[in-house]
Image (tube, rainbow, N blue to C red):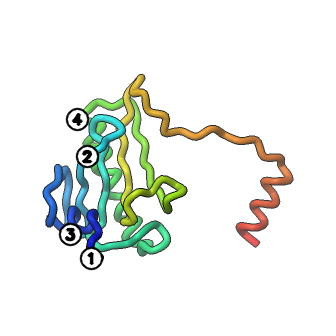
């Protein structure tokens, strides 16, 4: 897609700190990382979000993320790891090019990437389930 910064980075038109690359993806260190080693899995083809990306491509993104995450865990000795994938501005997506965040987590890293659980009633959960599957 013309003008997409992640397309340009993924295809090598803009320099990046690449930590993995194959024919389908480039994985780069995030320039504004949440933690040390925060990386982005970028497909080389443009897809705005999870709703546009083909199933095979998103499956391959997960395989790449696992490989890179294992390497990050081994080399940076993180205590845990978040995989985050945002869809739409309301969900925190700031670049409309599908990407998967690999965020190493360290004890007391100061990040709050978790959410606050809510308490829906059993009836509300059944209603939501019925809307989704019905």
Residue at (21% x, 62% y) in the render: 9
Residue occupying the point 20% across, 54% down: 20
Q: Earlier in the sequence, mark 2 or mark 4?
A: 2
The residue lying at 19 percent from left, 50 percent from top is: 19
* Image x and y of residue 134, in percent: 76, 72
**Label 4 near label 2: C-beta < 8 Å?**
no
Point out the residue furthest to the front here.
3
Tell me how far mark 3 sits from mark 1, CA to CA: 20 Å
x and y percentages locating residue 128 in the rendered image: 76, 60
Q: In 3D space, how far apart are the residues under numbered discs 1 and 4 (Cα atoms)?
A: 36 Å
Query: Residue 69 or 115: which is nearer the viewer?
Result: 115
Q: Residue 14's mark?
A: none
Residue 33 x, y percent position in the rendering:
31, 41
> Toward the viewer: 14 or 100?
14
User: What label sits on residue 31 in the rendered view?
Assistant: 2
Lower position in the chain sequence, tag 1 or tag 4: 1
Label 3 vs 1, first from the N-terminus? 1
Seen in the picture, residue 55 relative to 104 is either above or below; the reply is below
Q: Could you say whether the residue bearing mark 1 is in a helix, strand or loop?
A: loop
Which numbered marker is on residue 75? 4
Number of the label disc, if any, that sits on residue 23 = 3
| Mark 3 closeness class: few <14, some 14–19, many ≥20 residues within 10 Å | few
Compared with residue 61, is residue 57 higher up or lower down, i.e. above or below? below
Secondary structure of the residue carrying tag 4 is helix
Q: Is residue 91 left or right of residue 73?
A: right
SS category of the residue bearing label 3: loop
Q: Quadrant of residue 81?
A: top left
* Marks 2 and 4, how far apart at CA: 19 Å
Q: Quadrant of the N terminus?
A: bottom left
| Direction from residue 63 to residue 122 in the image, left or right | right
């Amino acid at each position: 897609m013309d003008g997409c910064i992640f397309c340009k980075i993924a295809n090598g038109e803009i320099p990046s700190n690449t930590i993995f690359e194959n024919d389908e993806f480039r994985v780069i260190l995030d320039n504004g990382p949440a933690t040390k080693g925060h990386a982005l899995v970028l497909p080389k083809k443009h897809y705005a979000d999870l709703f546009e990306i083909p199933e095979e491509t998103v499956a391959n993104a997960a395989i790449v993320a696992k490989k890179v995450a294992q390497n990050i865990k081994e080399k940076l000795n993180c205590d845990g790891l978040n995989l985050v994938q945002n869809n739409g501005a309301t969900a925190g997506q700031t670049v409309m090019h599908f990407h998967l965040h690999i965020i190493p987590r360290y004890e007391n890293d100061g990040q709050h990437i978790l959410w606050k659980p809510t308490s829906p009633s059993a009836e509300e959960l059944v209603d939501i389930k019925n809307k989704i599957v019905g």
